[in-house]
Amino acid sequence: MQANGAGQESSELSCLNSAQNGESSSGSGTHSNGLLSSSNNGNGVGTSNGASTGSGSGTVSTVSGSDASSKKKKRLSQAEEDVIRLIGQHLHGLGLNQTVDLLMQESGCRLEHSSATKFRNHVMEGDWDKAENDLNELRALMHSPNAIVRMKFLLLQQKYLEYLEDGKVLEALQVLRGELTPLKYNTDRIHVLSGYLMCSHAEDLRAKAEWEGKGVASRSRLLDKLQTYLPPSVMLPPRRMQTLLRQAVELQRDRCLYHNTKLDSSLDSVSLLLDHVCSRKQFPCYTQQILTEHCNEVWFCKFSHDGTKLATGSKDTTVIVWQVDPETHQLKLLRTLEGHAYGVSYLAWSPDNTYLIACGPDDCSELWLWNIQTGELRTKMSQSHEDSLTSVAWNPDGKRFVTGGQRGQFYQCDLDGNLLDSWEGVRVQCLWCLGDGKTVLASDTHQRIRGYNFEDLTDRNIVQEDHPIMSFTVSKNGRLALLNVATQGVHLWDLQDRVLVRKYQGVTQGFYTIHSCFGGHNEDFIASGSEDHKVYIWHRRSELPIAELTGHTRTVNCVSWNPAIPGLMASASDDGTVRIWGPAPFLETQEPDGPNENCSTMDS
């Protein structure tokens, strides 16, 4: 594998003719291609690569050791040479130097160019004059003529810092003025380095320079930087095998449809002997609990930002707040908030999870702001009986919120319901405040999402669809928007580039308001309700669903994924229930994967 864009060097830089380089040992039987003769790994077959000889009779001819030494082995391919060097580098890092010597001798390869080896040793020993001379030998092996200057600058910088740490200020000053400055490279950095002359002691120097100090650690880090200027055929990138293995593990995890846990970059946490695979039984597609306390259609559900509570809103005029057990992940009723005469169709938690705002359907002109910690109603807001306040979003500061509806209201208010700003003539379907604290996204009856800035009173078009946008939500980083589009389904938009990224298939979406969500670790998954009574789950990068969750008996209006517990999800339905979804029970996970009553997969 070539790295850093370097071209393949001549074979003398990696695998050598042992005889030509004086590496043959007496009795070793080294051939002209630099490979040692053997008995084919001890199996007694003297033919190259174990292939049979003869005229196709099917018999394998055994030959004596003298005959074997006269046969030439196949020359190693470039890939085989690379693998041997990677193995050698890894073994060298483990301190198995005799094993490395034997491997290099038997394969006819060498770990790195001899000039690179000298250079490495001189750097690690802090012999800066010799290391600088080594650069002249390496010059001919490098592809970039400017690389020598950069490498020399790094060497001299380390030399300068070590002199300073040792208290050799005059010598350090000489390096700065007589060696670094004449390079005429990175003058800004030279000015910074000159400031270190004022450091009163070594600890101060190390802190200001963000440097480990003289020794193996800083010199090893220096070598890692220097290597980036050298072709890999001259000196391998540091810890190259570990890097490749880590990339392979991460790629397998990325391609795993059901991977829903935090990525551990350490190779010690995985087995390299098996491919990575997650079972769907570890995924939240099994009914853990059915909440039946509502006595009519449940229109909305939303977990708090810390994942400790779930709020559900219903046509039965109540909001129920549930407590999530951190150990069992079971939910129990915490309190019921009553009096929402028109029903509750939308809920929004404040950034600190202290308050909860409840909105009603189209003909509701009121908005309720509840203190969840005390259960008290802090504010009941209504600007006009002609208003329709159906959606709400909190400003990130937690001191303001925006609300609006399809009759043309669009307000910004404080926690007491006082009107701070308003925007005329915007028929709002759904709202979201971005993290900048200034921009409010609003979907309207013109099948678009526009960005509104309440500070400078500017607005701009961001998303334009061909059908009504029934609802939308935004990813944590503010980059992606997930839209439920009438008669079309679930669409993913990139808000920064303003492009449609993906159309997710399977869901049945008419003109009901259905709320989808991002979820799982790193928000890698998307879930949505559907008019066919199911919950659909997709991996964000794939348009086909990876799971269809059955159990509800009427339209599923809303899905919420717990932001703190990736394996916990809730869905609210017109059947009057809220279903809590989680991994398969422990006993089930011991059984082979198979069809079940809750979850069907759509693997592709």
Image (cartoon, rainbow, N blue to C red):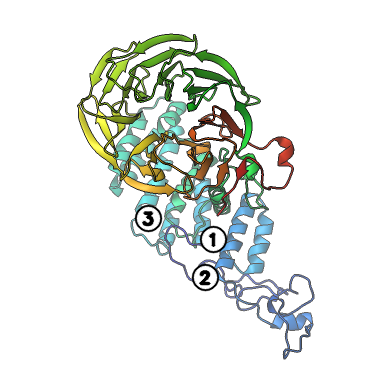
Residue depicted at x 27% and y 33%: 451
Mark sitting earlier along the chain (3/1)? 1
Residue 35 shown left or right of residue 299 in the figure: right
Q: Which residue is mark 3?
A: 148
Kindly state the secondary structure of the residue where label 3 is placed.
helix
Q: Does 111 appear above or below 424?
A: below
Residue 119 shown left or right of residue 93 in the figure: left
Q: Real-space Cα distance between discs 3 and 2? A: 22 Å
Residue depicted at x 76% and y 89%: 57
Kindly state the secondary structure of the residue where label 1 is placed.
loop
Amino acid type of the residue tagged 1 in the rendering: Glu
Amino acid type of the residue tagged 2 in the rendering: Glu
Q: Which residue is mark 1?
A: 112
Q: Residues within 10 Å of mark 3 (few under 14, many from 20)?
A: some
Q: Which residue is mark 2?
A: 12
Q: Position of residue 531 (x, y in %)?
A: 48, 39
Q: Position of residue 34 (x, y in %)?
A: 61, 74
- The quarter of the rendered structure image containing the C terminus is bottom right
Q: Does 552 appear above or below 272?
A: above
Q: Are marks 3 and 2 in contact (CB under 8 Å)?
A: no
Q: Position of residue 201 (x, y in %)?
A: 44, 26
Mark sitting earlier along the chain (3/2)? 2
Q: Real-space Cα distance between discs 2 and 1? A: 10 Å
- In front of the other: 325 or 152: 325
Q: Are marks 2 and 1 in contact (CB under 8 Å)?
A: no
Kindly state the secondary structure of the residue where label 2 is placed.
helix
Q: Position of residue 47 (x, y in %)?
A: 72, 80
Q: Are marks 3 and 1 in contact (CB under 8 Å)?
A: no
Q: Residues within 10 Å of mark 1 (few under 14, many from 20)?
A: some
